[in-house]
Image (cartoon, helix red, strand yellow):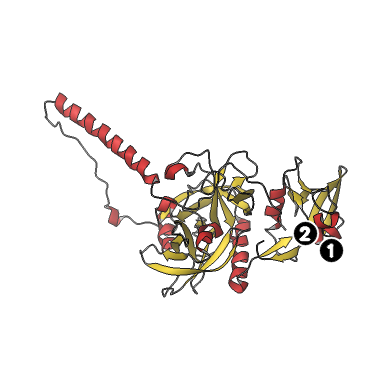
Amino acid sequence: PPPVVPAYGAGGHGGTGWGVPLTTDGGAAKPKKSGKGGLVAAVLAAALLAGGVGGGVGYQLAKNNGTFTGSTTVSAGDSPRDLKREPGSVAGLAAKALPSVVTIKAQAGDGEGGTGTGFVYDQQGHILTNNHVVASAANGGKLSATFSNGKEYEAEVIGRAQGYDVAVLKLKNPPAGLAPLPLADSDKVAVGDATIAIGAPFGLSNTVTTGIVSAKNRPVASGDGSGSKNSYMSALQTDASINPGNSGGPLLDGRGAVIGINSAIQSAGNGGFGGGQAGSIGLGFAIPINQAKNVAEQLIKTGKPVYPVLLVSIDLQAKVDGAKISEGGASANELVDPNGPAGKAGLRPGDVITEFGGKPIDSGPTLISEIWTYKPGDTVKLTYLRGGKPTTVDITLASRVGDK
């Protein structure tokens, strides 16, 4: 089971501690909730700019004694309504996808709330989003989903997985003709592929941004800053602009198919709109849709997540190049379950796991991120060091039902 982990990043809820790429030292933020305060700075800047332009025009007219000297313009050949946008263009793909993307409003029992994003998963009215978007309203709160046409529907939580940061909602009275977004094979995504992100950054619904896949298999841990409720993903990295409020929204490929769920951002600091909330610097992270789909199907079926596990305790503070199995704080049988996958394969406290499934492991959270890309029952090759000597074994993953 994932042990208690330290906070990654200095901030708390909504601050810079939300979502930290484990290969960097900076803080980060889950693009969770949005407020209206962020627009103030933009409006003010626009007002100052307009004032500056107005002053310049006034000065020029005064200099010319109020005489307007005229100007020459060139007219476009076609009016905007005559323009033809190909179905495969960004405009065409966005127009097709927007009706299937919803802005989620989550309100806790105490009245506190925020907005996030989700998208239509199937024709039965299920909506796929992030757990952290709906967690505050999951017990006794109110949830609603607003479509791009402005129609709002009440929703309820069917199941949520805090560890995966995935949740499934269902519209209480879904409209007819729901169009689920097509799901791509995220394993086939390549670095450099085009991406389109849709969401409600800072509450601005139906916002579309574009970019590319910047990296794959990026280990990311994100949480509330307390270290007690962290999520892990082997993420797709994109430079498409993602901000608070984009969480839970789809990351599309160049065909308009979903390759991931936008979930976290790396922040340069505490600045940005929304009273110190982090903003986009071109480092966004999405849960690959293959993993999210597996989790969603389990949640729809049973209402509970199922996690693949090694049944060992990992020392997340160890200063080693790998994932070190804890050596203290409990008995050896508690640190490595002798009847668990790792115990049966011969691993012991103090061993350092350096490779899992053919991928290098540089830390404990990286190992958890990689484990959770598999399913219980999968057999995976694992390499560990003991006394500096590498050993490779086959391990069949066990399962754990529900969040701790």
Q: Is residue 59 left or right of residue 346?
A: left
- Which quarter of the rendering shows the N terminus? bottom right
Residue 86 — which label?
none
Q: Position of residue 350 (x, y in %)?
A: 83, 47
Residue lying at 53% horizontally and 42% vertically, measured from the top left: 267
Q: Do the residues labelled 2 and 1 touch (CB within 8 Å)?
A: yes
Identify the amino acid type marked 1: Asn
SS at circle 2: loop
Residue on which the image places disc 1: 339
Q: Position of residue 198 (x, y in %)?
A: 46, 55
User: What is the crowding at mark 2: few (fewer than 14 residues within 10 Å), some, or many (at least 20)?
Assistant: many
Residue 311 — which label?
2
Real-space CA distance between mark 2 and mark 1, rounded to the nearest whole angstrom: 9 Å
Identify the amino acid type marked 2: Leu
Quarter where residue 65 is shown:
top left
Report whether residue 246 is seen: yes
Q: Position of residue 27 (x, y in %)?
A: 57, 41
N-term mark: 2 or 1: 2
